[in-house]
């Protein structure tokens, strides 16, 4: 009997004596040990890996904002917002940093996503560690309206700057600012810090000491919220790196400013005032007199408040 697949005329013995098919697996060979890498090749490969890692970190540090880079370096005084690096090199002579006028228009003023209660309760805390170079009384603690606006005029040696204080944004900050204005605290003071660095274009004022260390002898609470932004035409309070550390210093934003929402916005700047700030910015920064080390410093065009008034 033939099995399935048997050909007629062939017996089983003949079938098993046929030569093996040509597609059999090749004969097994012992494995060849890997070649040893020379010391020179190891050094070359290791060096290449290090170079790639360094280049990647350098790109992330300087090409990707906010990664391995402190875009907002701190200062030791009531500095307000800090400028992005790198700092300008020191100079033994007066130098000026030129400023190109912004091509952007006035920024949209920030708004609270939820209105404040009206009134709110304000509190002002004495600060014995920071005596005021110029004596002034703090506003009384108590209720303050969170609605309405008040105009303020800064008469300066560089020209008049008009402000509009907004209680809906920061009622207690507005109460404090108006109190200082009515007591003549700002009269005769100078703006001590100009920054024209990309990402921080502002003029900082309100220090009776004139060097960023002075204040009114008390502190006020921050009135901030996550949606705060800072752009051309915004008026905001300066402070130290600590929360609720503002007092009298404020800054006037005239260009692009990218800072976290940690500085109380309490008003806006009028168009003639922005023109004055542009003129001061075009004069540049006197970096030879700067002690901050971030490229900002006293403006080359002095800005002294001859009189600060409100109706």
Image (tube, rainbow, N blue to C red):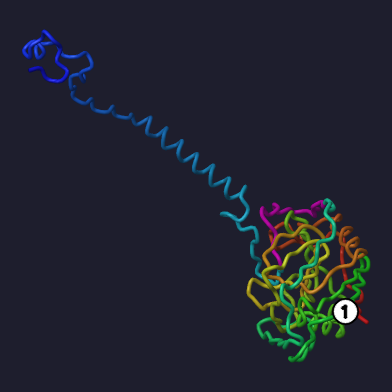
Quadrant in which residue 197 is drawn: bottom right
In the rendered structure, the answer to whether residue 177 lies left or right of residue 240 reads: right
From the viewer's side, name the closer residue of 193 and 245: 245
Q: Residue under circle 1?
A: 150
From the viewer's side, name the closer residue of 91 and 158: 158
Residue 201 at x, y percent in the picture: 78, 59
Q: Is residue 307 above or below residue 272?
A: below
Residue 91 on the magenta segment:
yes
Crowding at mark 1 (Cα within 10 Å: few <14, some 14-19, many 20+): some
In the rendered structure, the answer to whether residue 154 lies left or right of residue 202 reads: right
In the rendered structure, the answer to whether residue 189 lies left or right of residue 222 reads: right
Quadrant in which residue 180 is drawn: bottom right
- Residue at 50% x, 39% y is 52
Which region of the structure is painted magenta?
Answer: 81-99
From the viewer's side, name the closer residue of 33 and 50: 33
Magenta stretch, main secondary structure class: loop
Residue 96 at x, y percent in the picture: 81, 53
Residue farthest toward the top in the current orientation of the protein: 9
Residue 194 at x, y percent in the picture: 79, 62
Quarter of the picture holding the C terminus? bottom right
Figure label count: 1
Residue 174 at x, y percent in the picture: 80, 80
Quarter of the picture holding the N terminus? top left
Quadrant in which residue 230 is drawn: bottom right
In terms of secondary structure, where does tag 1 sit? strand
From the viewer's side, name the closer residue of 147 and 53: 147
- Residue at 27% x, 28% y is 34
Q: Is residue 124 above or below residue 113?
A: below
Residue 251 on the magenta segment:
no
């Amino acid at each position: 009997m033939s099995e399935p697949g048997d050909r007629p005329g062939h017996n089983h013995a003949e079938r098993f004596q046929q030569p093996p098919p040509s597609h059999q697996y090749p004969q097994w060979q012992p494995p060849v040990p890997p070649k040893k890498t020379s010391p020179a090749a190891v050094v070359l490969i290791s060096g290449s890996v290090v170079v790639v890692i360094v280049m990647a970190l350098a790109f992330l540090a300087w090409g990707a904002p906010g990664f391995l880079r402190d875009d907002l370096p701190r200062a030791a005084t009531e500095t307000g917002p800090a400028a992005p690096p790198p700092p300008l090199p020191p100079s033994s002579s007066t130098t000026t940093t030129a400023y190109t006028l912004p091509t952007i228009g006035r920024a949209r003023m920030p708004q609270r996503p939820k209105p404040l209660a009206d009134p709110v309760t304000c509190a002002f805390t004495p600060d014995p560690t920071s005596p005021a170079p110029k004596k002034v009384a703090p506003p009384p603690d108590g209720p303050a309206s969170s609605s309405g606006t008040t105009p303020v005029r800064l008469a300066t040696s560089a020209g008049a700057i008009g402000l509009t204080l907004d209680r809906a944004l920061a009622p207690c900050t507005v109460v404090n600012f108006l109190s200082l204005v009515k007591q003549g605290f700002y009269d005769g003071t100078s703006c001590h810090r100009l920054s024209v660095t990309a990402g921080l274009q502002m003029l900082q004022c309100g220090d009776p000491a004139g060097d960023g260390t002075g204040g009114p002898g008390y502190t006020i609470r921050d009135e901030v919220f996550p949606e705060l932004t800072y752009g051309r035409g915004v008026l905001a309070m300066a402070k130290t790196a600590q929360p609720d550390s503002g007092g009298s210093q404020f800054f006037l934003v005239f260009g692009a400013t990218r800072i976290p929402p940690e500085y109380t916005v309490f008003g806006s700047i009028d168009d003639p005032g922005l023109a004055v700030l542009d003129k001061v910015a075009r004069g540049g920064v006197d970096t030879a007199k700067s002690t901050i080390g971030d490229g900002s410093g006293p403006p080359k065009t002095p800005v002294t408040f001859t009189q600060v008034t409100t109706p």
